[in-house]
Image (spheres, rainbow, N blue to C red):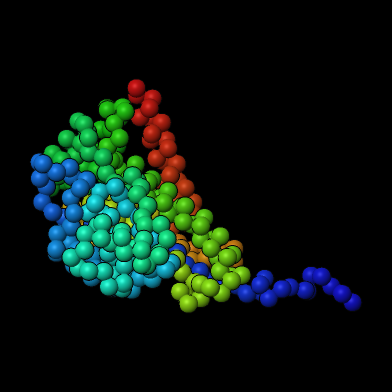
Amino acid sequence: MYNPEKVTSPEVEKKVETKIILEFMRHGEPESWKESQPDERRRLTEKGRAQSDEKGRKLNPQADVSLAWSSHRDRAKETAYRTMLADENINPDAGLEDIEKVISEELKVGKKIISDKRLDYNDEGELGDLLWEADDKGEFLDWLVNKSDKEALKYPGNETITYTRAAGNIAEIIGRYAKIGNNFNRIASKAGKYEKFGNQLERYLGTHQGIVELFIAKIIEKAEGVEERNEFIKALGEGFELTEGPRIEISSKDSEQNIYMAYKNAEGKEEKIEIKKELLEEIIKDKENFEKSIESQK
């Protein structure tokens, strides 16, 4: 007898594991700051370009399924580009415009780059002055984690980087790709065109000192407590080294999804943490409530 429940198409039966990789990284070595040049236009030095190229070669990026994200600052853009295109024989001396020309005319890897202010930092106003005063004392991350949110309440309307803001920003980006991960899994399960890429999408995100460190600190705080968080910050010192940062792996199969974060601790050893979606949502909600508190001070 015909039983419709036992009739399935090959597409339904084929369940593959897909991954979205998010490589967050601090930019490479930048040019020295000059009064005549806006900070946003600072490029990488020769050493910074080499650092970014080397970072990419270690990751073995696949340009056809990759996309670069960064803040609007040129040094972060260059770092994301060079890391993503490390296997595409980009000239070591190529400038930002040269790379963009190669992408648009030769590589055809899609949209050049996504600029996102959530990967940037704002250091304007009195709150920004307090941030750099702390930096001069060697207390950059400690001030951000332990004091920035409270100080921000005194300056309504200011959009300077704070602990809760930065952590929430990164959580939003990861949460966005967690949703994309489910859709990508359905697409890859029905079409074999991603098999040659390991059923994987890759994103290379250039950012700045303190941004992703605050996200990790928030994850540790909520998962293991304030004491462990403070130990992480103390051991990390001023933050990740140039071109270093966490790797987020979003693995999806059918209706199941897992999110893991890996990063090198202060001793150079890899730490790996599972991130629950509920925790991401909580960190995003914390940011929303924080902004409401700031707004109420006006």
Q: Is residue 141 above or below residue 99?
A: above
Residue drawn at the location 37% of the way across and 52% of the way down:
114
- Total number of numbered labels? 0
The answer to whether residue 287 is left or right of residue 137 is: right
Name the residue at the front extreme: 105
**Residue 216 appears at what percent x and percent y?**
33, 54
Q: Is residue 50 above or below residue 76?
A: below
Name the residue at the top extreme: 298
Name the residue at the right extreme: 1
**Residue 19 appears at what percent x and percent y?**
47, 67
**Is residue 24 visible from the viewing direction of this image?**
no
**In which quadrant will I find the N terminus?**
bottom right
**Is residue 103 visible from the viewing direction of this image?**
yes
**Residue 290 appears at what percent x and percent y?**
38, 35
Q: Is residue 281 above or below residue 16?
A: above
Residue drawn at the location 39% of the way across and 60% of the way down:
67
Along the line of sight, which residue is nearer the eye, 152 or 42? 42
